[in-house]
Amino acid sequence: MSVDVEQSETDINEVRLVGRVAAEPQTRELPSGDQLVTWRLIVRRSKRKGEERAQVDTIDIACWTPAARKRALSLQTDQRVEVTGLLHRRFFRAGGGAASRYEVEARAIRRAP
């Protein structure tokens, strides 16, 4: 797929989410030796007209930098936090076929009010 983009356009990939930590973050060591901390953030959607309750989304968060990994490992379940970062689509093999999943690469994590 090819996309024509004028040089004066600027692409922006910035994500800001505020929600609560779904469960304790997990650390993985990749075959390359890199460390990765992953966790999930539960974010409520705005309540739509006619809905009894607001729906939620569970967002996968990946922490690659030492600072983001350290901060993520200090998080506790149900803690309210703000995450800023970049949206990525990750491709992998599952069940004999290709699959993909979106995740946020955290650049900063802080407590939310």
Image (cartoon, rainbow, N blue to C red):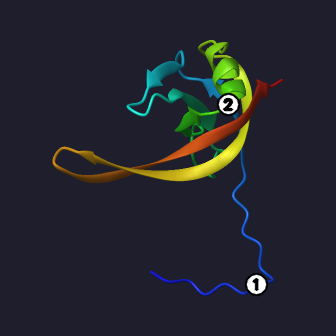
- Figure label count: 2
Query: Which residue is depicted at the point 70% across and 20% down?
Result: 71
User: Would you say the residues marked 1 and 2 are in contact, meaning their CB atoms lie under 8 Å apart?
Assistant: no
Q: Position of residue 59 (x, y in %)?
A: 54, 38
Residue 73 appears left or right of 90? right
Q: Amino acid at mark 1?
A: Gln
Secondary structure found at label 2:
strand
Outermost residue toward the front in this view: 32
Above or below: residue 4 compared with residue 86: below
Outermost residue toward the right in this view: 113
Q: Tell me the quarter of the picture where residue 52 sits.
A: top right
Q: Position of residue 66 (x, y in %)?
A: 67, 26
Q: Nearer the viewer, mark 1 or mark 2?
A: 1
Secondary structure found at label 1:
loop
Quarter of the rendering occupied by the N terminus: bottom left
Q: Tell me the quarter of the picture where residue 41 sits.
A: top right
Q: Tell me the quarter of the picture where residue 37 sits.
A: top right
Residue 74 appears left or right of 95? right
Dot 1 crowding, Cα within 10 Å, few <14, some 14–19, many 20+: few
Q: Read off the residue under disc 2.
A: 19
Query: Which residue is depicted at the point 68% across and 28% down?
Result: 68
Outermost residue toward the left in this view: 96
Q: Amino acid at mark 2?
A: Gly
Quarter of the rendering occupied by the C terminus: top right
Q: Position of residue 108 (x, y in %)?
A: 75, 34
Above or below: residue 107 compared with residue 68: below
Q: Position of residue 55 (x, y in %)?
A: 55, 40
Query: Which residue is depicted at the point 44% across and 24% down?
Result: 29
Query: Which residue is depicted at the point 67% across and 12% down?
Result: 74
Disc 1 to disc 2, C-alpha distance: 36 Å
Q: Which mark is residue 27?
A: none
Q: Read off the residue under disc 1.
A: 7
